[in-house]
Image (cartoon, helix red, strand yellow):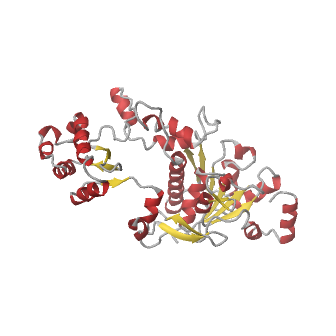
Amino acid sequence: MPLAGVKVLELGSLVAGPYASALLAQFGAEVIKIEPPKDGDPLRKWRKLHEGTSLWWYTQSRNKKSVTLDLKRDEAREIVRRLAGEVDIVIENFRPGTLEKWGLGWEQLSALNPQLVMVRISGYGQSGPYSQRPGFAAIAECMGGLRHVTGFADRPPVRVGVSLGDTLASLYGTIGALVAMHHLKANAGKGQFIDVALYESVFAVMESLIPEYAEFGFVRERSGASLPGISPSNTYRCGDGHYVVIAGNGDAIFKRLMHAIGRDDLGADPALVRNDGRVRHNDRLDAAISDWTGLHPLDEVLKVLEAAEVPSGRIYTAADIAEDPHFHARDMIERHALPDSTPIDFPGIVPKLSATPGRTKWVGPELGAHTQEVLGSLGIDADELARLRADGVV
């Protein structure tokens, strides 16, 4: 696998840090996840549970090794230092200053391992006036500008249905780790830490939000299901009550769309040839498209638009995804088994590498399943491990 030989130490819980290390684990990195004894990562109890363990846990923690250590104990922190001296990457998502308080901050760990790459994910970053505030994805999505533009103008802002701020931070953290590793190996560089803030990860994908404000004083507002400044692109009701998303905003695509719905008069209108002109007449175009979709059931709408090569699609539920042949053809639905042999479907691994693809080797492990293995590699024998367990260190 492409990351075979790379060792990662994961310190943290829930989503942002653990998902970053999950991506590395899916491509072959050995990920050692440190969890508190007894309860483990809180994610083990989030959302739907099977026999007391979260299904989210099983998929996000696949390929990881679970080691229990109470980081509030000196002996546990000493074990972490020994592990940090042997790994390539440390990923953590504690509030800034927490690891420093425990003697496990960047300065302390990099002194033990000068080639260490450390990914530090937090709500507001390691510096700045807000750095000590607790930060979750929901707050980051607000501060990063996403929440204000999500929803309908006459209703309160809404959130997307997943922890998007966490996931974006995970992706940036993973990119940062791989960039730093490349610099270390290809450019004879040295170890470094990557400072990832949840709110900045959201802010970074907000397109032209700030340039538009800087140049025009324009504050983008909520626009429902449409894309502001891009026309036509919206969600339209079909004759059978279902909805279709149509993106007819390319110049050539727009002409094909208008022909498909019997409105060649609009497709040939010089005022609508380019996007800026169509934006000025967006309501008129949406009305024309809605008039057409409202006369036909969803399947017929999709058939006509596919023939016209107009990007369009139904709004998928989990059931739609699970049954769709394209997901299965591209191995985006993986069948695995839970510890009690119950079959379970996981999402496939992204991205797809042609020569060295990622894969799922095992589902999220039981709490502490690899403690003996990992601590044994440090020279901690069975008697010492028994003592550490009795003392509550592991």
x%, y% of residue 118?
61, 53
Numbered disc total = 0
Residue 10, located in which quarter of the rendered image? Answer: bottom right
x%, y% of residue 371?
75, 66
Res 84 visible: no
**Quick one: which residue is furthest to the front in this view?**
240
Examine the rendered structure and indicate whether residue 41 appears above or below residue 126.
below
x%, y% of residue 323?
43, 65
Identify the residue at horizontal 58%, vertical 50% (top origin): 16
Q: Nearer the viewer, residue 354 or 336?
A: 336
Q: Nearer the viewer, residue 200 or 88?
A: 200
Examine the rendered structure and indicate whether residue 321 appears above or below residue 257.
below
Examine the rendered structure and indicate whether residue 114 appears above or below residue 271.
below
Res 185 visible: yes
Residue 364, located in which quarter of the rendered image? Answer: bottom right
Q: Nearer the viewer, residue 173 or 59?
A: 59
x%, y% of residue 287?
24, 39
**Relative to 324, 378 lies left or right:** right
**Quick one: which residue is furthest to the top in this view?**
217
User: Which quadrant, please, contains the C terminus?
Assistant: bottom right
Identify the residue at horizontal 75%, vertical 55% (top origin): 39
